[in-house]
């Protein structure tokens, strides 16, 4: 009896120790990532076509908030930091966090390490809406026409996926994944048609938007997108434990008390919300939702309690750094944001495919 008790105690102690190490590693990674993000954000305020000294950046922001005297800073620098750089950087953080969290959630939901936010068709559907508004010259909502069209496109694509996937009696994630791929391909064809009929001016706008850009970021956009993005991220974080249980398989998760169907639907809605916000205000930016969650898993493991918040921070960091590079390499021109994420994501995707192949099979 005593031997059994001792063994149970050692097992419990070992599990507790392992959990403690995971928590410590997760907390340390989140702390370091947050510090790196803060450094990148502060640095990005002063870098661009017009460089602003770091001290003037701090004075400009502090002065606008009523914390310090910024009379020594030129009005031009204050305007650059407060009116141009700050909303752009904040939007970059929101977009990066949205795409990374959505990617981590979808990979956990589908049980597929190759799943990406675009796989459920929301990104492609949003692109159809925005490109359609540009090419047809629709301006019924003024400057908000393209963002609203992107939201509606993503919503329609998601609704079609729901209707088709629900026809499967088992409601499996495999069916939803395949339907999402088909819808995404169809949306890409529609986007290609709009690109084909566009004129020269529209083609330039379409090309830049499809490759991603934060060049039009304004305070109004940040104010609109911040609430749904934070709500979407909070909703996914609340589902961290069900995502962990889904990794065991849908049947096992159901036995452990997870309402698999309801959880799957809620995760799809939250992912659609996050991806729709990102695409509507920054265009199509690929691979963030694929690369970041995998990097985080390599650092701290697969537990979603830490995977999701760390992914949010590193996703924001990636987009902030990429956007800073996009407006710094060839000022005053800007390199499309999606080029940087694609340059990182494409080789990473190939490496991931190679890694997922059975041993002994070459790519």
Image: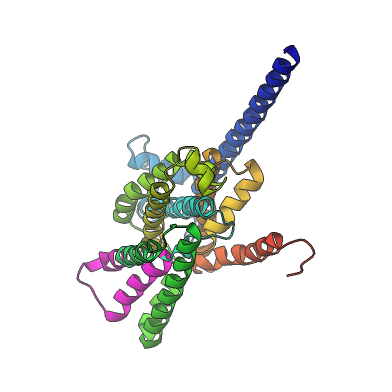
Q: Is residue 291 magenta?
A: no
| Position of residue 324 in the picture relative to residue 344 (left or right) | left
Q: Picture coordinates of residue 215 (x, y %)? A: 41, 64
| Position of residue 130 in the picture relative to residue 298 (left or right) | left
What main secondary structure does the magenta stretch of the protein show? helix
| Outermost left residue | 140
Q: Up-down: is 335 above or below 22?
A: below
| Residue sitting nearer the eye, 108 or 199 | 108
| Outermost top residue | 2
Q: Up-down: is 304 above or below 221?
A: above
**Which residue is depicted at the point 57% across and 44% down?**
36
Instruction: Tell me how many marks there are.
Output: 0
Split into 4 quadrants, where in the image is the N terminus? top right
Q: Picture coordinates of residue 354 (x, y %)? A: 70, 64
Q: Up-down: is 101 above or below 5?
A: below
Residue 79 seen in render: yes
Q: Picture coordinates of residue 343 (x, y %)? A: 60, 66
| Residue sitting nearer the eye, 244 or 128 | 244
Q: Picture coordinates of residue 321 (x, y %)? A: 54, 55
Q: Quadrant of residue 39?
A: top right
Instruction: Provide the residue span drawn in magenta.
Output: 122-149
Residue 77 seen in render: no
**Which residue is depicted at the point 80% across and 64% down?**
360
Split into 4 quadrants, where in the image is the C terminus? bottom right
| Residue sitting nearer the eye, 263 or 316 | 263
**Which residue is depicted at the point 62% across and 47% down?**
297
């Amino acid at each position: 009896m005593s031997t059994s008790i001792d063994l149970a105690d050692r097992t419990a102690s070992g599990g507790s120790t392992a959990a403690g190490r995971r928590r410590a590693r997760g907390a340390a990674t989140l702390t370091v990532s947050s510090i790196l993000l803060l450094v990148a954000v502060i640095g990005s305020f002063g870098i661009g076509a017009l460089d602003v000294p770091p001290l003037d950046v701090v004075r400009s922001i502090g002065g606008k908030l009523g914390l310090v005297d910024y009379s020594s800073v030129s009005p031009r620098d204050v305007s650059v930091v407060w009116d141009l750089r700050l909303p752009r950087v904040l939007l970059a953080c929101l977009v990066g966090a949205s795409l990374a969290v959505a990617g981590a959630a979808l990979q956990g939901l589908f049980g597929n390490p190759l799943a990406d936010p675009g796989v459920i068709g929301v990104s492609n559907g949003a692109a159809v809406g925005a490109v359609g508004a540009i090419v047809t010259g629709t301006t019924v909502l003024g400057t908000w026409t393209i963002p609203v069209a992107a939201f509606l496109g993503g919503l329609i694509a998601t609704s079609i996926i729901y209707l088709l996937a629900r026809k499967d009696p088992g409601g499996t994630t495999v069916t939803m994944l395949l339907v999402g791929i088909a819808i995404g391909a169809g949306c890409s064809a529609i986007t290609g048609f709009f690109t084909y009929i566009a004129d020269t001016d529209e083609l330039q706008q379409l090309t830049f938007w499809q490759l991603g850009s934060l060049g039009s970021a304004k305070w109004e956009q940040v104010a609109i997108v911040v609430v749904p993005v934070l709500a979407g991220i909070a909703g996914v974080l609340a589902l961290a434990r069900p995502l962990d249980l889904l990794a065991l398989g849908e049947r096992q998760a159901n036995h452990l008390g997870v309402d698999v169907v309801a959880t799957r639907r809620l995760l799809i809605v939250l992912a659609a919300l996050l991806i729709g916000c990102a695409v509507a205000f920054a265009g199509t930016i690929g691979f963030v939702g694929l690369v970041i969650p995998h990097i985080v898993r390599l650092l701290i493991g697969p537990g979603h309690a830490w995977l999701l918040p760390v992914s949010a921070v590193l996703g924001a960091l990636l987009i902030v750094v990429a956007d800073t590079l996009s407006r710094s390499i060839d000022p005053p021109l800007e390199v499309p944001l999606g080029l940087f994420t694609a340059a990182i994501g494409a080789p990473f995707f190939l490496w991931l495919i190679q890694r997922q192949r059975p041993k002994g099979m070459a790519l």
